Structure formats: C-alpha cells, structure tokens
Amino acid sequence: MRSANINVFNSFGPTADEICRQVERILGSEEFHAPKRGRNFLEFVVNETLAGRSDFLKAFTIANIVFGREASFDPQNDPVVRIEAGRIRKALERYYLVAGQADMVIITVPKGGYVPHFEYARDLPPPLAAIGEETSRATEPAHRDRPLAARAWRPVRLSLLGLGIGVIAVLAFALSAERDGPTGPLPAAASLPKVIVEFFSESDLADTGLDIARGVRDDVIGQLAQSDHIVVVADPLRTGAGGDLVLQGNVQLDGSRLRTAARLVRQSDGVIVWANNFDADLSAENKLAIQGNIARQIANAITQPHGAIFQIDTDTAAEPARTGDQGAYACTLAYYSYRQSMTTQSHDAVRECLQQATRRFPDNALSWALLSVVYLDEVRFRHKLGTAPSAPSLEQATAAVQRAAGLAPGNPRVLQALMMVSFYRGDIDKALKAGAAAYAANPDDVEVAGEYGFRLAMSGKWQSGCELLSIALNRGIGPEGYYEVGMALCAFMKGNVEEAERWSRKSDLDSNPMHRLVLMSILGAAGKTDEARREEDWLSLHAPALLANVRKEVALRLQRQEDQERFLNGLRASGLAIAAR
C-alpha cells in the first residue's frame, strides 16, 4: 500500500496513512471474504484515490488494469467490474459487522461508482430507545451521500449483536424489501407454508459443539426470514406454533472436523422433503464464516427457486388450474414444478393457472413475470414443448412483462423476465441492462445469475457469461442438464471441442432438440461425422422443423455473426446442408 501522512479529504477525515493501515488490516482479516481478484480491486481503487486519480476509476480502467481484460472490453455489456464491486461491498459490510466493530476507520465503496469513501467510525451507538432518532438523522442532507451500509447498518452495528437474531432478521428483511421493490399484494401469511426451525442438537458434549449448533440455527433463521415464500417460526415450543414443515438439524464434532446434518420434514405425514450434510474444517476456516456458509446453503436449498419448497408433484402443482383455486402462491409453486418437468401438460397447466391468477390478482407483479416466461417458452422451447411457431406468444410475453415492470420495476424476478423477453425480441442492450440490474439487486439468487450468464454468453460476452453459468451449475440449481448446454457452448466457442462434447452429453438431450443440435455441431467440428449423423437422424424424426429452419433458430439465440458462423460451420462439417443467407 502507498502510505502518506496527509489528509486527502478534509480536516475531520482519516489520513492517508490511517487509510493504508486500515486496508492492510482488512486484507489480513479472516473475516474479509473476498477472492484474490476482489482484494486486488479494493487495493487498486484505494491507491488510485489516495494518489488523486479517483476521476479515472471507471469500469474500463479497472477491467484492463486489475482484471486483465482486452482493450476491446465493453463496460456497458460486460458486468465483471460491477459484479466484483458488489462482492467487495458485501465483504466490507460483513467485515465491519463481525471483525471490524472497533475499527476507527470505515472504508466503503458506495453504489453507483468505484471510488471508495473513508471516514472515522462514530462514537458508541445510542441506547436502543434512541435508534429511531439516529436513523432519522441519517436522512438529513449532510448524510445523503453516504452508502446504505454506512447509513443503515454502521450506526447500530454494536447494538445489533445484543438485540438477538430476531431483530437482525427483521432488519435484513426490511432492507431486502427496500432493495427489491414492491411486488403487488403479497400472499396472505395463512396461505404460505409455515416452517418451524427446531433447536439443533449436538453430538458432542463440549461447549464448542453446543455453541456452533446454536450459531448455525440462528443464522439459518436469519436467512430464511428474508424469503417471501415462507413463514418462519423461531420458537418451536410456543403453543399453537404448528407448521407445515419442520427444519431439523444436528451438529457433530470430530476434532476439528464439523458435520452439520439438516432435513426438512412435512408435518402431515413425516415425509422427508429434503436432507443434506455439510462438512467443514474448523482448523481451516473461521467458526463464524463456517456457520454463515452452512446457513446460507441450507436456506438456499429450501427457499431459492427450484428449492425444496418448490419440489412438489407436478399433478399436485397443477391442481389449482383444474379446480379453479388460482391463488398466486399456488401458481408460483406450479411454475417451479413445471420448470423441472418442462412437459407439454405441465406447461399448459401452469399457463392456465397463471392466467387465472393474474385475472384474480391483477396487481401481483410476480404472477405477471412468471406468466411472461411461460409465454416465452412457447418460442424458445417450442421444439421441446411441441408448440407451433407463434408471434403472438412473444407479444403476449412482452405485454405480461411490461405489466410486471409497471408494478415492480426493481424486483429481481421481474427484471429477470424482462431480460429474457427483451433478449428474444432482439433488444440486447435492454436485456443486458435488465440482467445487470437483477443480478445487482440479488447476487445470491442463483437462478438470476444463471439466466444472466446465459444472456451474456449468447450475446458474445463469453468470459463473464460463462463465469456466472459455472456458479449456477456448481450450486446444483435448475432443471437437470439446463446449464450444461451453456457450458458446452462456452467450451465450443473457446475452441475446446473435447470439453464441449463432454458438457453437451450431460445436457438433457433426450427431451430438448436444440441441445441435440448443439451436440451435432460439436461432433461435426470434432470430425466425428458418423456420430453427428446419428444426431441428425434423431432430429429428423423428432424435430424436422428445427432442421428446416436451422439458421433462423441459431440466430434467435446467438447474437454475434461470428458465433453463428462457428456454430453453423460445425453443422456443415457434419454433412448438414444449410441454405445461404
């Protein structure tokens, strides 16, 4: 770090020397969870600011100097710098909540730019009764330029640790609601599944085991409380606390080895809906970090799209469409069940369910957003679903997502739908802007990351897109084989046909003709013409319209001319005759 005994801001701010020492303290802390690239980012923006070059801290400069991007880097469409800045903001926020509570110098990177902000920590926080007054003062003009972390979290961070997990969960939920924006009338609490979080047991009598068991459970409650899809019951002993589901956990210690077992049980019949084990090494990681990571994985497995609460039988999920009980939440369940099966029957059922739900609850933004994607599937998955080519389907998708965006323009799920519909309408700039906003609003949403990664990659932003696709794939979220075909194209466009073939054969080949076409192009490029012809024979039998309109279908998905030609050349090498443009 560069060091200087000067104050580069004002007479009341920290000196450059104090800032440098603070950066070194942060980078040396186990509680600062950032990869090497993120650490380089933080050190670079601080150094440049101290050197008086903050005006040059633009996405292009950072991408070239810190991340090694080419001179052709396009900051408008490639989100690598925004993504890393978001991670650093969260890492700094966590550091000051956990390890940096007593630090005198506060470093933040305000949203909307990459220039860091430095200030001295305030005095000890006011008593609990005065917190409301302190918060109100944070909205006065003198503080309006402070980042959210400084305005909302830092003044009360010490008090939060003493208030307990319930208050933390409420504050986290409130911040999440402010971030996501309104979604129209939410389902009544009575219609949401109620999850009771039991006390986690521990198989070791040592105090450490009991402490970790309590910590994991508290962190799980905090994570679950942020979901709009469930009602969380934190006191399982409360009279009348009966719920639909029970989350049970057990913590085992063997030396430094830690195993946390968790399972979600349906109360009505004792069926285990979901179960998994999570292993960690206390000698390699900080205890609080381990607790947080385990809690996040458990909460994601339960409440994220395609999580445990959405893993219901397709026939049961479609029941509301047949009985006329089109509750918005019931149709959301039906939608995620449909995403897993992707059959003509489940598509028709969820389409009818969402159509009726939007008629009954016209101000529910999520129902409109999901309906727009169901309409869009009739275009992008028409060879899989057996739907006829339909321009009206794309128009219906556009109208539905516009209605959703009018109700909740900042909601990540609405932005995701807007991204997908805009992409297939050919408005790539609008699609990528919506995708960037959706990812920035909730970087932990794996479905958003995966779909955004797909759109980036198909737009020619292969490096950034493939990074996000790999995140979604590694989390095990989404329909089986869905992200694998994206990884196959990533490898193919890099010229690694062997790796591309491996990924392609892991995709859902038996039910998705487009994925068969991807494998056929890869095999052609690899010189495996006999195997490529077998794929052509399968497509001729199951999806003849795809082969007849192959150039149009490829252009609908791959936006760059050079990417289209690379793909078509693989098909030509396999022996497929492709009409000239």
Image: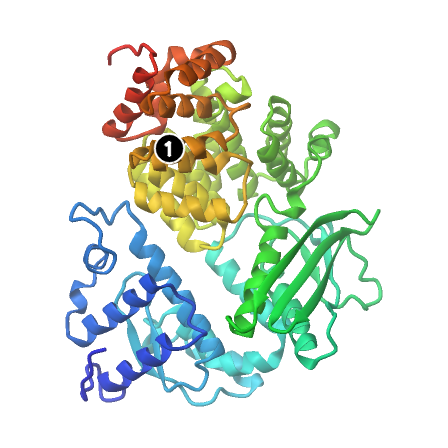
Between 102 and 189, the residue placed more toward the observer is: 102
Q: Does residue 201 appear left or right of residue 42 in this picture? A: right
Looking at the image, which residue is at 22% across and 46% down?
A: 74
**Residue at x-position 30% and y-position 60%:** 112
Query: Whole-percent x and y of residue 478?
Result: 54, 40
Side of 457 where 371 appears, left or right: right
Q: Residue 66, percent across and down? A: 23, 60
On screen, residue 97 versus residue 525, left or right, reads right
In the rendered image, residue 275, in percent from the top left (x then y), is placed at 69, 52
Residue picked out by circle 1: 498
Q: Residue at x 40, y 71 (%)?
A: 92
Q: Depth check: 157 or 285 in front?
A: 285
Number of numbered discs overlaid on the protein picture: 1
Residue drawn at (42%, 43%), measured in percent from left and top? Answer: 469
Q: Could you say which quadrant of the image residue 300 lies in?
A: bottom right
User: In the depicted view, which residue is nearer to us: 475 or 403?
Assistant: 475
Q: Mark 1 packing: few (<14 Cα in 10 Å), some, or many (20+)?
A: some
The three-letter amino acid code for the residue at tag 1 is: Glu
Q: Secondary structure at mark 1?
A: helix
Query: Does any portion of residue 456 appear in the rendered image?
Result: yes
Would you identify the image quadrant in which residue 399 lies? top left
Quarter holding the N terminus is bottom left
One can see residue 363 in this view: no
Chosen colour scheme: rainbow
Q: Nearer the viewer, residue 573 or 457?
A: 573
Spot occupied by residue 226 in the image (x, y as percentages of width and height): 58, 59
The C terminus lies in quadrant:
top left
Task: Establish if 418 lies above or below 251.
Answer: above
Vertical position of residue 388 compared to residue 360: above or below: above
443 sits left or right of 566 in the view:
right
In the rendered image of this protein, does residue 220 appear above or below residue 372?
Answer: below
